[in-house]
Image (cartoon, helix red, strand yellow):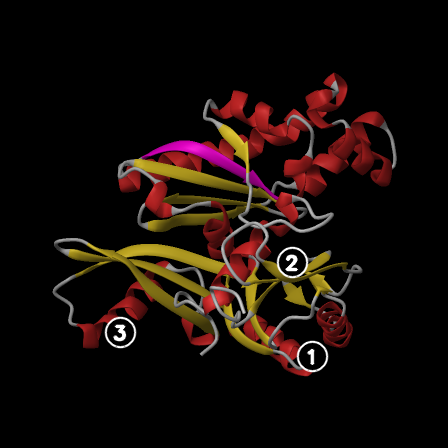
Amino acid sequence: MSLFGKPKAFGLDLSDNALYLMEVKGESASSVTSAAHFELPKGLVEDGKVLDQEQLVDYLRNAVAESQPLAPSSNNVVLGLPESQTYIGHFRISKEISKKELLDEVYAEAGDNMPIDLENAAWDYEILATTEDAHEILFAAASAEVVEDYEHAMNLAGLDLKVLEPEALALSRSLIKPSDLEADQGVAILDIGARTSNLQFLDKMGLQLSLSVRVAGNDFTAAIAKHLKIKVDQAEIAKRSKGFGDAKIAATLNTIMLPLVNEFVEARNFYEAKVIRKVTDVILVGGSSAMPGIDQELQNLLRIPVSLGVPPFSFTDLQSHQIAAVSGLAMRGRILSSGINFIA
C-alpha cells in the first residue's frame, strides 16, 4: 500500500470521440495505478449527451477490464461533464445572510442570473472565499436529464458514480495550483476541442469565469480542406502534421484563429474588470493544442505568454493534452475531496 493509501475512486473523461480512465495513488508523475483509452464511434456521445446507452456501457465495461497495468481498485467513479452541458456562474452574497438562509439566497441569485431553469437542473455551489462583507460563490448547474443519463449508464456498467463535476474544474485542478498565484494575478486556460473551445479564467480564489466558444478544431480542418481543395481527412492530417509551420496552411488557420482570439480578448477584458486582476499567462490544452506552432502563434496574437498544459501525471503513449482533464478527475477521486458535485 502506498504512503497515500488506497485510491477511493478513478477518474473518467468522456468526449464525443474518446474515453479516458485514470486512477492515481499519489501526486507524482508515476502515481498512475490504472489507465485506459478508447476511441469512441460517432453517434455514441454527441456534444456531451449520451445518445447510445447500450454501446456506451460496453465501452465502460471494456475500459475497466482492460485498464493497465491493473484494473481500478474500486468501482467508484469521478466523471467530468463537458463545458457544453454545464453552466457556471460566480457571484457575491452578503455575509449578513445566515448560514441557514444561504442556500435559499444562492438559489435565488442563480435563478436570476443563470441561463437555465433550475427546477429542471442539477446544481451545486461552493464558497470560494469570504471577504469582510461577502461570500464569493461559485455556482454550477446542468440539465437534470443529462445528469440522469450519465448516472444510468454508470449503473448499467456496474459503476458507482460518486462525483459528477464540470470538466472545467477538473482541468483547472490538473493544470494550476491557485496557491502558486500572486494575489493580483489571473491565469487563463484555453481548451480547443473538436466542436467547441472552452475558456476559463482563474486566480488565487479559484475558477472565476468559464464560457464556451463555437470555434474549434473542426473549423480549422474544414478551412484547410476548403482552401487547399482536399478531403477532410487529408486536411486533418495536414493540420496535425504541419499546422502553423506551413505558411499556406498558417494563413488559412488564422482565418479561424482570429475570431477565437477576439472572443478570448473580450472575455479577458470582462474578467479583469470584474476582479481587478491581470491575466499574465495562457495555458493551452485540447486536441488542437497539438498543432505545430499554435502556442507561439497565439502568443504573438495575444501578447501574453502561452504554454502547453502539462498535467501532473503521465502514461504510456498518451499526450499531455489527452490526459489533462482525466488527471484532474483522478486527483479528486484519490481522496474524494469535496466541491461542486451534481450527484445528490
Percent of width and height locating residue 221: 75, 37
Q: Mark 1, mark 3: which one is toward the viewer?
A: 1
Choose the circle earlier in sequence order: 1 or 3: 3
Check disc 2 and give the amino acid type: Asp
Choose the circle earlier in sequence order: 2 or 1: 2
How far apart are the alpha carbons under marks 2 and 1?
21 Å
Closest to the observer, 98 or 203: 203
Q: Mark 2, mark 1: which one is toward the viewer?
A: 1
Where 316 sits versus 222, above or below?
A: below
Percent of width and height locating residue 244: 69, 24
Q: Are marks 1 and 3 in contact (CB under 8 Å)?
A: no
The majority secondary structure of the magenta stretch comes to: strand
Q: Is residue 280 magenta?
A: yes
Check disc 3 and give the amino acid type: Asp
Task: Kindly identify the residue that appears in the image at 68 percent across and 82 percent down.
Answer: 156
Where 252 sits versus 77, above or below?
A: above
Residue 279 seen by the camera: yes
Closest to the observer, 10 or 7: 7
Tell me the crowding category of disc 2: few under 14, some 14 to 19, or many 20 or more residues within 10 angstroms, Cα based: some
Residue at mark 2:
47
Percent of width and height locating residue 76: 57, 75
Q: Is residue 34 magenta?
A: no
Residue range of the region highlighted in magenta in the rendering: 278-286
